[in-house]
Image (cartoon, rainbow, N blue to C red):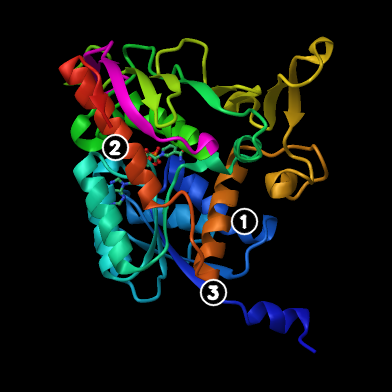
Amino acid sequence: MMTEKSNVSARKTIRVGLIGHQFMGIAHSNAFRNAAAMYPVPCKVEMTAVCAQDTPENLQAFADKFGWQSIETDWQKLVARKDIDLISVAAPGFLHKPIVLEALKHGKHVLCEKPLANNLADAAEMAAAALKAGVRHCCGYSYRSTPAQALAQRFVQEGKIGRIYQVHARYAQDWIVDPNFAMVWRFDKAKAGSGSLGDICAHSIDATRFITGLEFTEVIGNLVTLIGERPLDGKNPNGPKGKVTVDDVAQFLCRFNNGATGCFEATRFATGRKNHNCIEINGEKGSLYWDFEEQNYLYYYDRTRPAPEQGFSKINATQDAHPYGGGPWPVGHGIGYGDTFMIEIANFLTAIAKGEEFHPDFNDGLAAQKVLDAVERSANERKWVRV
Ligand SMILES: NC(=O)c1ccc[n+]([C@@H]2O[C@H](COP(=O)([O-])OP(=O)(O)OC[C@H]3O[C@@H](n4cnc5c(N)ncnc54)[C@H](O)[C@@H]3O)[C@@H](O)[C@H]2O)c1
């Protein structure tokens, strides 16, 4: 009889290399460190190396904190390492394509943060290269891994809201309302591809595809830059300025392949809104509403109930019967932002270990990129365009 120990040691080990050590670098590091302990994963994880743009001392301190076994200061060296199976890309958009293509050339599995690329042509090239490489690929649309979004998808698939008539999504933040907030890579089109459109509206687009199964067919967009230049150094607001070359606010109307209609807005200028990532889906038999700021809850309206009982019910989506079973905690205790990455990475590691299909993959990334591209074209041409 196999002992627990021999059972564990017989499991495959997936050796990981991470590029990026700030916002998403921390989210990925936490997830690779803890996913297999907190969620079911049929393999072991080795945190082999981390790379970022920093001094070797700072990078080593980061590696020590999270348990990365070694550091690299050149991403090309990291992706070429023979002791790494999976590359996780948590770097700005302009680096996604070169890193991903090089990693695929070396036969690595790849997790690439969203949006997949800075433009449609690059995203198409990356998706084609991933298919050709025959590896597993993930595009980091992490909000799919919230139990409430997964429950919303289940409800749609079970026909609970019937034919979908309309989708209304708003992703609103306020972190750049201050005109003296300094220039960062996110305000430079060459580095970020777009502004709130690719940064946050991309999540709403993916959530819509994920929950409803609908595809976008036509859009009319409006992209606005509210603050045209920002100080290069936030501590010196009167010093040299840089030009903002991306949208601050992205809005679009759309039509879907079932005839439904949609209304989307993404902004980082919604004073008071911190991470108000919300989506409402209205169907013939009911409606669904979710807001990340109450991420553990799904609001469900059932129009088939007797009229006196009708109203939105607020479902705590972290019970045993729900997707991901509420994580490692007892029924209804809830989970947090870090868990979405643990769930995403646990699912991705599982797909790699078992050789199974995985979503969201680069094709999902490409599908979202087609919508981003159409919104940009439409806003430039000031008319409806096909996706
Ligand atoms: N899934 C999500 O919800 C989510 C949230 C935020 C950001 N993102 C995406 O994650 C990606 C990274 O965003 P972020 O917020 O972590 O950015 P960030 O600015 O916080 O971090 C960028 C990281 O990239 C590293 N880097 C930059 N140039 C490099 C180079 N030449 N070689 C190696 N490393 C380099 C930096 O050192 C830094 O660690 C973006 O694509 C962004 O859209 C996804």
Mark 3 sits on what residue?
13
Helix, strand, or loop for circle 2? helix
Q: Which residue is mark 2?
A: 370
**What residue is drawn where x is 71% and y is 19%?**
303
Residue at mark 1 = 34
Rendering quarter of residue 238: top left
Q: Which numbered disc flags the more N-terminal residue, 1 or 2?
A: 1
Ligand 1 quadrant assignment: top left
Magenta residues span 211-235
Percent x, y of residue 175: 43, 20
Viewer-nearest residue: 311 or 23: 311
Q: Secondary structure at mark 3?
A: strand
Q: Earlier in the sequence, mark 3 or mark 2?
A: 3
- Disc 3 crowd rating (10 Å Cα; few below 14, some 14-19, many 20+) is some
Task: Tell me if 2 is positioned left or right of 377 in this view.
Answer: right
* Residue 171 x/y as whole percent: 47, 22
